[in-house]
Each structure stands twice: as structure tokens, then as C-alpha cells.
Amino acid sequence: MTRNWKTRTKLVHQGVRRSQYGEMAEAIFLTQGFDYPSAEAAEARFVKAGEDEFIYARYGNPTTRMFEERIAALEGAEDAFATASGMAAVNGALVSGLRAGDHVVSARALFGSCLYILEEVLTRFGVKVTFVDGADLDQWKKAVVPGTRMVFFESMSNPTLELVDIEGVTRIAHAAGAVVVVDNVFATPVFSRAVEQGADVVVYSTTKHVDGHGRALGGVICGTQEFIRKTVEPYMKHTGAAMSPLTAWMHLHGLATLDLRCRAMAESALKIARALESHPKIAKVIYPGLESHPQHALAMAQMGSGGTLVTFEVKGGKEAAFRFMDALEIACISNNLGDAKSIATHPATTTHQRLPQEQKDALGITPGLIRFSVGLEDAADLIADLTGALDAA
Ligand SMILES: *Cc1c(COP(=O)(O)O)cnc(C)c1O
């Protein structure tokens, strides 16, 4: 499926299916079903659907298929299944591959809904889950035992941008026969080399950088053809969290500019991190692209970039953090990321509000902490906005 094209070419052309009209923009096949040429053809397709034969949009759709092929090619994965949201992708990858009695090892620092699936859903159905500090390979070594079925982690954690060594964890997991599932949202599909680094399954919330304009909710599971077709597809097609063709169409256009956007955002992120590091109102800047980040070398080896988010702590706790946010003129106050518009988030009172204090402390979610998703605005304007708001704080 993957041609020998470089990334930017794949992002524009991979997976295109043109109708008899030769349309330039990919068509939106906003149809739930398909008209078969004969009763015999319908029967044959239900026995075995060929490569470009569709039955029902819950199973697959030509526009969705174009998106799946394009993002699989970007990721270097054999195949992909598009889902209604990032959480549908995480849930689909985990639940489809597990059964009662299985053992899973997961990093502790997770997006709240991912934590819910591991802590509440999987355990309710008899899956045993062990949590480890994702950055500590010794803890993975101790927790993964022969027979462990799956390991799960976010390759860069939210909001404190701590990295998990994909190659290191994969070596430990594969020695025990476990499948490696990586939630790679913060790394972005552009900076990801997770498949090359050994991950078996890579999931994305495409709501973030892939859509890139804060419009549509979506997700995708990338993996081997065997895992996607034999494990994921049966579960997804019968449980129903399919991606809408309209979303797939928006995402196709998101992918066309994804490489350019992520690189521009990361370039601005480094400038912003450097500018904030010396500001007197800042207690600390966390950005993996800075030499001061404790995992700078791993970030460069794993992603070749520090990514598109900068996290920092404003001196003066919650009050100062709120004064800072309220003084921003360009950046929005919201909780998405990877958007063209820069977004400031206060994790302690929003995305991570419900965590008990000791968990916030363990994850480093302090009252002055701000997560900043760098957008596509001019970097100098963003730096002026941030430093101006800090002066006001
Ligand atoms: C946003 C996000 C999700 C969930 O994605 P949705 O599209 O909102 O369902 C999962 N994991 C990570 C790391 C995320 O940032």
C-alpha cells in the first residue's frame, strides 16, 4: 500500500480514489450504504469484501478509507482504522486485544479518559492492570512478566511533557511477548517514528494536530494488517464508533498541511520556550527541545524535535496563573491542542481538576502550571503576548 514517496508527497496524494468525474478535492462519500450491481454481487461481497468494496459505513467508507491509507503511510504502519474520536481509538485498541485474565502494564501519567479505561473499564471485565512510572525502565522491567498481554503508554505525557523511551519499553515488552500500544498524540504523527522504534500499535486523537483547526473529533488506530483487520476491525465494526466521512474529508485536508504546520509550531515552540526561560515571573519552563529538559537527548533521538507544546510554571500560584491567562490577547483559553490558534490551559482547574491533590503533586500539576499549545501565529507576536501577560500577572 505504501509507495516509495517522501512524507510531504504522501500527505498530499496517498490513498486518493477518484470518481468518474476526476475531482481534484477528494470526494465526500456521504453515504451509509452501497448499491450492489446484482444479488449475486451482494452475496459475494458479504462472503468477502475486496480492497475497494464497501458494505456499510460502520465498516468502512471510501472517504474514510482514503484517510486511513494516508495516515498509515505517514506512520509507516501497514494499515489503519479510523474512529469517531481519540478515545474510541484508545478503547478500540485496548479492548479489542484483551480478554478476562489478561495482564496489562501501563504508564501512570495518562490523559484522564485513558486512565478511566484502564482503571475502571478493563478491571471491571477481569483484566489486571499494573501502573508504573513511565520514564523509569526499571519499573517496566519489574512489572512486565512473561504472559503480560499488553503495555500502554503516552509517549509524551500531558501536561508535564515527560517522555517514555519507546525503544526501551518495546524491548522489555517484546521479550515477554506483550503487544506495545502507544498513544502518540503529543509527539504528533509528524515527529513520530514509533513503528520504526518497535511499537506494534499507535493511536492518535486526530482531533488535535491532524484536524489542526479545532473542527472535528476523530481518532485512528495504526498497526499491522493482521492486528487491524483481525483484531480491531471486528470489534470496531460491531460496536459502532466509526469515523464520519465528513470528518475523514476534513482530516484528509488536515494531513496535506500537517508536516508544514507541526514543523512551524515546533519552531515557534522552541523560540517561546527560550524567551520564557529567562523571564522573572517564570519559575520553570518544560520543553523537551530545551537543553535544560532532563530528557532532551531522548526527545531528539525519538522525535528529532521538542514538539508543539510548552509547559511552564508562573510564580505566584493559581492567582498569578489566572491573571496571566486573562491578560492574553492572542492566545485563547481552551483545552484542545494542535490547533492553528494558540491555546493556554490551566490543567489544575480544568483537564486535571478531578485528580486528588496527591496525584496532582505526583504528576507535577502545580497551581501555577500552564500548558501552552503553540499555534500558527507569528512567533514574535506570541512571545510579545506571553511576556506582556506575564508582566500583567
Ligand atoms: C485528546 C487526547 C485523547 C482523546 O482524544 P479525543 O479525540 O478527545 O477523544 C487521548 N489521548 C491523548 C493523549 C489526548 O491528548
Image (cartoon, rainbow, N blue to C red):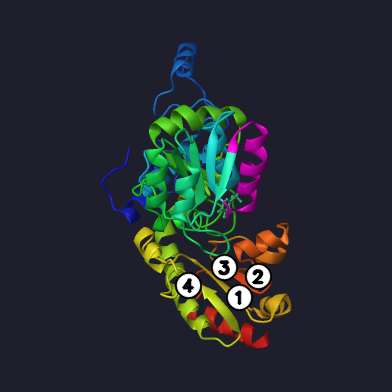
Q: Earlier in the sequence, mark 1 or mark 3?
A: 1
N-terminal of the pair, mark 1 or mark 2, is: 1
Question: Does the residue tagged 4 have its C-beta within 8 Å of any atom of ligand 1?
Answer: no
The earlier-in-sequence mark between 3 and 4 is 4
The dot on residue 341 is 3
Mark 4 — residue?
A: 269
Q: Residues within 10 Å of mark 2 (few under 14, many from 20)?
A: some
Please report the residue visible at 43 percent of the width from the left and 32 percent of the height from the top.
227
> Which tag, 2 or 3, sits closer to the chain's start?
3
1 or 3: mark nearer the eye: 1
Q: Is the Cβ of the residue at disc 1 closer than 8 Å to that at disc 2?
A: yes
The residue identified by callout 1 is 313
Report if residue 224 lies within the magenta region: no
Question: Residue 196: where, in percent of width, then height?
Answer: 33, 48
Callout 2–callout 3 Cβ contact below 8 Å: no
Report the disc number at residue 329: none
- Looking at the rendered structure, the kind of residue marked 4 is Ala
User: Magenta region: which residues?
Assistant: 108-128
Q: Which residue is mark 2?
A: 366
* Residue 213 horizontal side relative to residue 346, left or right: left
Across and down, in percent, residue 291 comes to 41, 75
> Under tag 2, what secondary structure?
loop
* Alpha carbon distance from label 4 to label 1: 16 Å
First in residue order: circle 4 vs circle 2: 4
Q: Give me the C-alpha separation between circle 1 and circle 3.
A: 21 Å
